Amino acid sequence: MHDMIQAFALVAAPDVLLAILASAIYGLVVGSLPGLSATMATALLVPVTFWLSPIAAIATIITASAMAIFSGDIPGCLLRIPGTPASAAYTDEAYAMTRKGQAEMALGAGLWFSAIGGIVGTLSLVLMAPLLAEMALSFSTFEYFWLAFLGLMCATLVARSSPIKAIASMLLGLLVSCIGMENPAGTPRFTFGLTDLLGGIEPIPALVGVFAVSEVMRAMITPEPPPLPRRKFGSILANQWMLTKKYQWPMWRGNIIGIIIGVLPGAGADMAAWVSYAMSKRFSKEPEKFGTGHPEGLVEAGASNNASLASGWVPSLLFGIPGDTITAIAIGVLYMKGLNPGPTLFTERASSMYALYIIFILANIIMIPLGILMIRLASTVLRAPRAAVMPVILVLCAVGAFATGNNLFSVLLVGVFGCLGFVMERNGYPVAALVLGIVMGTMVEQNFITSLIKSDGDLLPFFERPVSGVLAAMTFGALLWPAGVWVWNRMQGRRLPAGKTAG
């Protein structure tokens, strides 16, 4: 009880409340601008967190990401241009409702069920994390190695592109994580004689580059979205209670799917939205209405994407393994503020954990009034010319990069990773897998080498320990799955012409 009272005191601090309000408005504005993702909004906040207290810094990440995920629905509904990747799954459905004159219902569903999903996801975090923390206290370097390795493999399983391309992206990220002399042997690797590379590649410049700078580069070669006609919205939440009662099972299914996918390393809100929308159509009693402006898919997917945000913090807080790209950035901020992820965080810094839960719930509650205000101001925000927005983003990227390393080399790194992210996206290579490789490469290597030292070079302990053996089996299953899919497709491809000839 003392920890809970202390947590409320931490959240009630003026700087924390101001950080929550300011980052909420910022997240709503950035998320509503077509093409600017929630991850990019979060990455641009990192320089600001340097000057904030630990709780205020984490509050900005949590609040901005939750708001951006919701507000990405606004341009998707009104312009058929998803504001964030998580909104892309149901953009056509929401736009079809707008054409039917139901824009208020579509936007209200996105807002209402995003808030519900966020609160349910937070409750899952509150219940799951302490229980898993107790189990994680018995983990050794053997289990941590397989867990980190499994996280990398899961990222390739959930990738929407080719699994082979996802593995290639992940391996490139691992290669980047090898640069420098911060390795168990303390030997400079891949530095090419440059003293700036001795410290390795920091994750933050890489994240800002692949998500923000590459977005600016894409904006340069894509046409400007059409201007939004001015219109007056009616009641935003008028029909939401009716939709809640009518589609309560899809809503709960979306919450559960979001929680499960959120816990998987590397999946994230966009994957949760796609899977939930597909499930909604598969199990709907009226699947023929999907695509014509039917709210059922919006209910399930809208609840799912925000539920996955909170549950994605479970592996991040427990093991330092990012549940998605947003928590990959959050892990960097946690380390920077002395809140090192791990099971001991729940015992030694319990009040900070309770404060984090309170911030999650508070962010999803204030999402409703601020979201209604944002919807009414949408026509103004969406009229912001891209030529004015993109240069500001580029300047923020450069300033943020300079602040992380206090040298110009970090700014150069942001530019390099921006170009790399642009080329990868253009060719279908997922940048999320690259980011996971960079963030988790050091963890995989250090736990592997430490385990070998403990076992005197023997590999059997990696498989003999019960939990380690189960994690090893799961990792090999995830590793071999893409190869199995490729072999199966090749076999099916060879059988088809033979069948035609026989016919």
Image: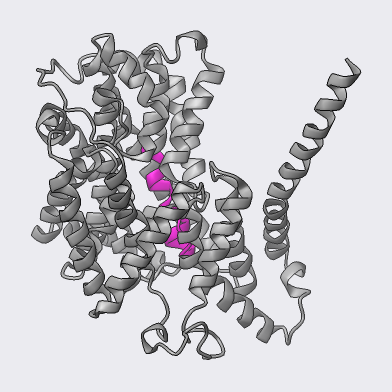
Q: Nearer the viewer, residue 463 or 199?
A: 199
* Relative side of 134 to 218, left or right: right
Asked where in the image residue 13 lies, by quadrant, the reply is bottom left
Task: Determine the residue located farthest toward the right in the rendered image.
Answer: 502
**Magenta span:** 306-323
**Quadrant in which the C terminus appears:** top right
Q: Residue at x 25, y 17 (%)?
A: 105
Q: Nearer the viewer, residue 279 or 392?
A: 392
Q: Residue 471 appears at what percent x and percent y?
A: 67, 59
Q: Is residue 212 visible?
A: yes
Q: Is residue 71 magenta?
A: no
User: Of helix, strand and loop, which mostly describes the magenta segment?
Assistant: helix
Q: Residue 298 appears at what percent x and percent y?
A: 37, 23
Q: Residue at x 54, y 71 (%)?
A: 175
* Relative side of 371 to 491, left or right: left
Q: Nearer the viewer, residue 363 or 75?
A: 75
Q: Is residue 349 visible?
A: no
Q: Nearer the viewer, residue 408 or 333?
A: 408
